[in-house]
């Protein structure tokens, strides 16, 4: 149960960081989370582990939190902000892939001890990045679209859980199938491949259920006028401004 315990700790750590960023800087705070999550998720996903008796890859929690962030942005700050988060993820993935693969081209010094390890991790990154870009574009833009579709049908604040789960559930299924096929088909045996497809979706779905209270908490913070004034003061001190809300 060691891996399972660490998995729970990882979920808690991700949620706490996201809530801290939103509590402190609001919209700008969780936009900062997007490049962190997509880059680290694409590194973690290379590592295969066993969770709950199934073959799985890491990165599911980090990647799953990007849906949490876009849902918070969609609910509280509108489509424009949510789509900006998706575009930031694109840029972060492409930049990380290009820069790290350029770094691998340098001839290491005789005393260097990191080249082989970096080669193991980042030589796979172009394929992982292609898989991520395809899955990310399809699933995240679908999530933003679906969230607002369900919001029109269930506009009440108490129905936020419907908007969150209905949009994220389908989006994560799309993401898991596209990403795993492009990234790992032919890398693992067929049985392990399908284990990864199913467990990837299942684990992301657990994250989606667990993050619903976080979306409600973020909604309450956004509805607090004093807290929103604090966000404006803090972001102004940093020389940045929140994206104009567009519901």
Image (tube, rainbow, N blue to C red):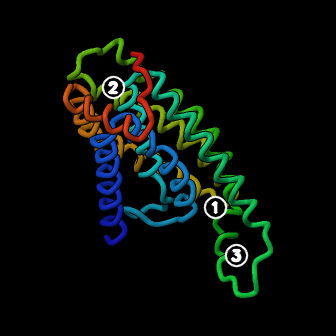
Q: Name the mark nearer the viewer: 3 or 1.
A: 3
Q: In which quarter of the view is residue 7 placed? A: bottom left
The residue that label 1 is drawn on is 189
| Location of residue 154 in the rendering, given as x and y in whole percent from the top left corner | 29, 15
Q: Is residue 5 above or below residue 32?
A: below
Asked which secondary structure carries label 3, the reply is helix
Q: Is residue 68 something one can see in this rendering? A: no
Label placed on residue 73? none
Q: Is residue 226 above or below residue 58?
A: above
Q: Residue at x 68, y 46 (%)?
A: 130
Q: Quarter of the image for the N terminus: give it.
A: bottom left
Q: Residue at x 54, y 58 (%)?
A: 45
| Location of residue 41 in the rendering, given as x and y in whole percent from the top left corner | 51, 54
* Residues under numbered marks 2 and 3 in contact, where contact means CB atoms less than 8 Å apart: no
| Location of residue 48 in the rendering, given as x and y in whole percent from the top left corner | 53, 65
- Tell me which label, 3 or 1, sits earlier in the chain: 3
Q: Residue at x 38, y 43 (%)?
A: 205
Q: Residues within 10 Å of mark 1 (few under 14, many from 20)?
A: few
- Tell me which label, 2 or 3, sits earlier in the chain: 2
Residue that lies at the very extreme toward the bottom in this rendered image:
111
Q: Nearer the viewer, residue 73 or 206?
A: 73
Q: Residues within 10 Å of mark 3 (few under 14, many from 20)?
A: some
Label placed on residue 76? 2
Q: Is residue 40 something one can see in this rendering? A: yes
The residue that label 3 is drawn on is 115
- Tell me which label, 1 or 2, sits earlier in the chain: 2
Q: CA distance from mark 2 to mark 3?
A: 44 Å
Q: Nearer the viewer, residue 69 or 61?
A: 69
Q: CA distance from mark 3 to mark 1?
A: 28 Å
47 left or right, relative to 16: right
């Amino acid at each position: 149960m060691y891996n399972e315990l660490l998995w729970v700790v990882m979920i808690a750590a991700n949620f706490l960081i996201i809530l801290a960023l939103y509590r402190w800087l609001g919209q700008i705070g969780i936009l900062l989370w997007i490049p962190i999550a997509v880059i680290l998720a694409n590194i973690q996903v290379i590592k295969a582990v066993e969770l709950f008796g199934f073959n799985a890859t890491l990165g599911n929690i980090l990647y799953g939190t990007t849906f949490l962030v876009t849902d918070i942005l969609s609910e509280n700050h509108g489509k424009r902000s949510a789509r900006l988060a998706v575009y930031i993820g694109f840029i972060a993935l492409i930049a990380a892939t290009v820069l790290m693969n350029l770094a691998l081209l340098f001839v290491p010094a005789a005393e260097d001890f990191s080249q082989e390890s970096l080669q193991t991790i980042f030589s796979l990154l172009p394929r992982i990045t292609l898989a991520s870009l395809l899955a990310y574009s399809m699933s995240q833009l679908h999530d933003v679209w679906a969230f607002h579709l369900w919001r029109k049908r269930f506009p009440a604040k108490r129905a936020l859980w419907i908007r969150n789960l209905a949009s994220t559930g389908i989006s994560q299924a799309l993401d898991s199938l596209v990403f795993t096929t492009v990234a790992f088909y032919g890398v693992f045996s067929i049985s392990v491949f399908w284990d990864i497809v199913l467990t990837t979706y299942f684990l992301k779905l657990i994250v989606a259920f667990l993050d619903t209270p976080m979306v409600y908490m973020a909604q309450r913070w956004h509805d607090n006028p004093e807290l929103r004034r604090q966000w404006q003061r803090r972001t102004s001190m940093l020389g940045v401004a929140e994206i104009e809300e567009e519901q």
